[in-house]
Image (spheres, rainbow, N blue to C red):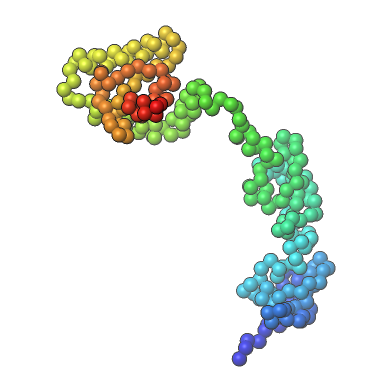
Amino acid sequence: MPKKPSDFTGQRIGHLNVFSRAGNDKKGGTQWNCLCDCGKTVVIRGQYLAPSKRGYQARYCSNQCKLDSRIIDMAGKRYSRLVGIKCLNEFNANGETLWQFKCDCGKVINTTGTLVRRGHTMSCGCLHRDNHFIHGKSDTPEYRTERVRKWRQRHPEMAHAMSRRRQADRFLRCPKWLTEEHKRQMAEFYRKADELTKETGIPHEVDHIYPLMGKTCSGLHVPWNMQILTKSANRKKSNRHPEEIVHSVS
């Protein structure tokens, strides 16, 4: 036997008072005449009035229902850089209340209270501009040096690990048959690089002609595989050996 539909006559469900049965919908489902607290009469499907499926329509006559109990008072309250001014008594397409807010920068905006309370909107847009300003100095050596310094301060463990890895690479690529004269010559490269940096004011570095850990070949940490380059030229050379540089230019 088919299940007998529930009788909601006389019941109060949310802000709806069910007062009579309406005709069935196109699919044969039961519908009920309901009076909302806002004074509007609406027809609600029985499945939305059932205790197991009392959704949004079971509480109000529609998404645009302007009940005072639905509006959360945000006037005078601070949300990040925004302070609530007044409710506009308007709703967007999703039934969310529109509010007027004043930003700390002085600009007044209209947005939904839901976005502000959830933290999706925290300013008029000035917060994003302050955190993502365009300074035009991203390609300068000073900016890159400062960016690396700040990264090392934020991630000291990773910076230490990278430094130790570089030391290990040198140790592994340093042959045991090197003499003391070879070691003196390698130390001389680093000394000359420091002198050039102080004399010219341009950073100089010691580079391995064939990188210690190249992708296609690896060189040794020996004096005849070392050269002095400016810091910019060394970064441009990157982890490439001479043959790769010639091939890329040609």
Residue 10 falls in image quadrant = bottom right
The residue sitting at 69% across, 77% down in the picture is: 46
Residue 227 on image: x %, y %: 32, 18
Instruction: Judge whether residue 208 can be spotted in this image.
Output: no
Count of numbered circles in the view: 0
Residue 213 falls in image quadrant = top left
Q: Is residue 137 above or below residue 95?
A: above
Which quarter shows the N terminus? Answer: bottom right
The residue sitting at 52% across, 23% down in the picture is: 140
Question: Which residue lies most toward the bottom here?
Answer: 1
Horizontal relation, residue 233 to residue 14: left or right: left
The residue sitting at 79% across, 54% down in the picture is: 90
Residue 102 falls in image quadrant = top right
Question: Which residue lies most toward the top here?
Answer: 199
Horizontal relation, residue 226 to residue 142: left or right: left
Residue 250 on image: x %, y %: 39, 27
Front residue of 240/29: it is 240
Front residue of 144/116: it is 144
Q: Is residue 235 above or below residue 86?
A: above
Horizontal relation, residue 160 to residue 114: left or right: left
Front residue of 140/7: it is 140
Residue 161 on image: x %, y %: 35, 33
The residue sitting at 42% across, 8% down in the picture is: 199
Horizontal relation, residue 17 to residue 223: left or right: right
Residue 27 on image: x %, y %: 68, 79
